[in-house]
Amino acid sequence: MNDKKEVVNRLPASRPLLLFNHNAKAGGSSILNLLREFKSCEIKVKTNDGPIEDDLLLKKYNNLLLQKLQKSDTNSSVIDSQDCFVHIKENKGSTFDDRYAGFIIGSIREPCSHFLSWWSWKSDGGSGLYPSRKSPNITKFLGKDAPYYNSTRDIQRFRKWIKQPGIRGQVEYHFRHNYGAPPVGADCLVIVEDFSNSLLHCLQMYEQQGGFVNWDSPLVAGLVHNKEEEEKSAHRRKVEEKQERNGTDDPLTNEQWRHHASCTTYYTPNLATQIEEGPEKELYKHFGYTGCCSSQFDHSTIYGSTYASTTISGVAVTTKGEEYNSSSDKRITLLFCLMFCAGLFWALRKIKRTKREKKTKYLSN
């Protein structure tokens, strides 16, 4: 890692190491499944580990290598450190300084949907996530009617659960703890409401600054295929309605989305307003979510202020406009200009010819 004192107000131009900062219940399992498919090893950094620096990462890498040597024969014991990625576990968090170690990807989810996913995960026996302070009512109001937890009784339980003091503001707290406020602890964020496109965007950014992405690996190729099909569709609203019924936009066939009904089923208007105007208000404001359970957000917060379409292995992907440099579209623009000039020239000639014909006719009379 570069000496931070030698770097003034900028990050290294190339950071080939990829780090994923895991924001629980915000698409993390799907992102991890994809990364594990084309990265040969996973270095886990936990809450009680020190700063994310070379010494820590090298130590963990050497431990992984030692474990592989002990379990495998000598012909399959090599791990390429450039093909490893770092998994920053839940509640560890990352800062701007941690980005000197590598390119960090995080994730974000609309708060109402995030609370619901959290509740359904705990209802299904999931571990972790709860704050340090304990409250007996937190577990008392978990869902009972598996697998969908959408019975009338469970909906009422959820509405009581989310009002508990130990739950209020936790989505905002976890996001701020993971990435900071504003989120300077990540280079790029995957947004669950536009999972495929935003994850492709992050992978492209990572590759452009020196990282390796295997676009032929099945899950990555599946993302590209989903994006291609989405670009072809003239009925985007149908896709959004399907996402609303499923409760999340998850292209990697993660079974976790089946653990609850649609988001709007669980929220009354008053409860939705409490979330929108509570501690999570800053997330609604920063990412431009239009309301509780909405899949609409301000795209500039994820993709930049301007948009264009570029290609990854021949497939269109939305990126920042300043990164767009397509020679094919330049040719199209040039062709359009030539056609416009030719049309203008033809029109002027026609006008001139018409005037000449009128003058000739007048003189002959």
Image (cartoon, rainbow, N blue to C red):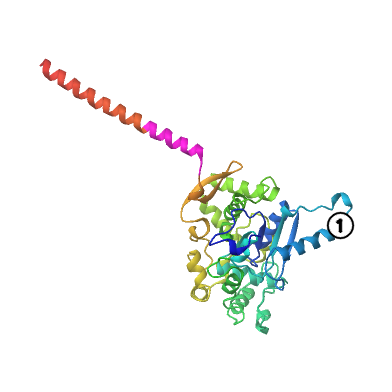
* Residue 58 locus on image (x, y percent): 75, 62
Query: Going by the image, does 12 lie left or right of 146?
Result: left
- Which residue appears farthest toward the top when viewing the image? 364
* Residue 16 locus on image (x, y percent): 66, 54
Is label 1 in a helix, a strand or a loop? helix
Three-letter code, disc 1? Leu
Q: Residue at x 61, y 75 (%)?
A: 158
- Which residue appears farthest toward the front when viewing the image? 6
- Which residue appears farthest toward the left when viewing the image? 365
Badge 1: few (under 14), some or many (20 or more) residues near its Cα, within 10 Å?
some
* Residue 188 locus on image (x, y percent): 58, 59
* Residue ID for mark 1: 69
Query: Going by the image, does 307 lie left or right of 66?
Result: left
Q: Residue at x 64, y 70 (%)?
A: 118
Judge whether residue 326 is colored magenta.
Answer: yes
In this rendering, does residue 150 appear at all?
A: no
Which residue occupies the foreground of this view, 174 or 8?
8
Q: Tell me the quarter of the image containing the C terminus.
A: top left
In this rendering, does residue 65 appear at all?
A: yes
Residue 96, above or below 81: below
Residue 12, above or below 363: below
Give the magenta range. Answer: 325-339
Magenta region, main secondary structure? helix
Residue 227, above or below 126: above
Query: Going by the image, does 286 lie left or right of 3?
Result: left
Judge whether residue 60 is colored magenta.
Answer: no
Q: Tell me the quarter of the image containing the N terminus.
A: bottom right
* Residue 281 locus on image (x, y percent): 50, 72
Which residue occupies the foreground of this view, 114 or 12?
12
